[in-house]
Image (cartoon, grey):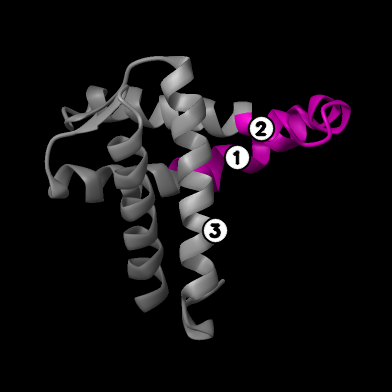
Amino acid sequence: MKKLIVKLLVNAVALGAAAAFIDGIRYGSITDLLIVAALFGIINAVLKPILKVLTCPFVALTLGIFILVINAFLLWMTGELAAGFGIDFTVTSFGAAFFGGLIVSIVSILLNVVLPEQFKK
């Protein structure tokens, strides 16, 4: 249970950082951000492996750079689903999703590096 809460908080901090640095990503409140972090985690857990398998030739051809496009798509999808559920979180464009996904990835990696071993995968 602790690992799940830590992963939720890591996602929330990463999404908050993306919203702070990218003009096209906004959230309403901390509660909205935590709900979106949970939604983002679910979307990543379910869809990212499927998309990686389906786009494997593109990922190989671009030496992994296409993963950034997948991350952007998943962040954009999170924004669309959040809007559908009435949660105040928006991603306005693909550019915002692309750079937001990049920031989310970097912040998540950095936070996972400093986390104690008991909270890692």
Residue beneath disc 2: 51
Residues drawn in magenta: 43-68
The percent position of residue 96, horizontal first and vertical second, equals 42, 23
Between 40 and 63, which is closer to the camera in this rendering?
63
Q: What label does residue 109 carry, if any? A: 3
Mark-to-mark CA distance, 3 and 1? 17 Å
Q: Nearer the viewer, mark 3 or mark 1?
A: 3
Inspect the image, locate mark 2, and give the three-letter code of the amino acid beneath it: Leu
* Residue at the (46%, 44%) spot, across then down: 104
Q: Are marks 1 and 2 in contact (CB under 8 Å)?
A: yes
The amino acid type of the residue labelled 3 equals Ile
Is 100 a magenta residue? no
Which residue does the numbered mark 1 point to in the structure image? 48
Whether residue 56 appears in magenta in the rendering, the answer is yes
In the rendered image, the residue lying farthest to the front is 21
Residue 1 seen: no
User: Could you classify mark 1 by the number of other residues whose Cα lies within 10 Å: few (under 14), some (14-19), or many (20 or more)?
Assistant: some
Kindly report the distance in space between the C-alpha atoms of the residues bearing marks 1 and 2.
5 Å
Locate residue 33: give its quadrant: top left
Circle 3: element type: helix
Return the disc, 3 or 1, that comes first in the chain's sequence: 1
For marks 2 and 3, give the one nearer the viewer. Answer: 3
- Tell me how far mark 2 sits from mark 3, CA to CA: 21 Å
Circles 2, 3 touching at the beta carbon (< 8 Å): no
Left/right placement of residue 70 relative to residue 39 reads: right
Identify which amino acid the numbered label 1 is placed on.
Lys
The count of marks equals 3
Question: Where is residue 86 drawn, in percent x and y?
Answer: 16, 27
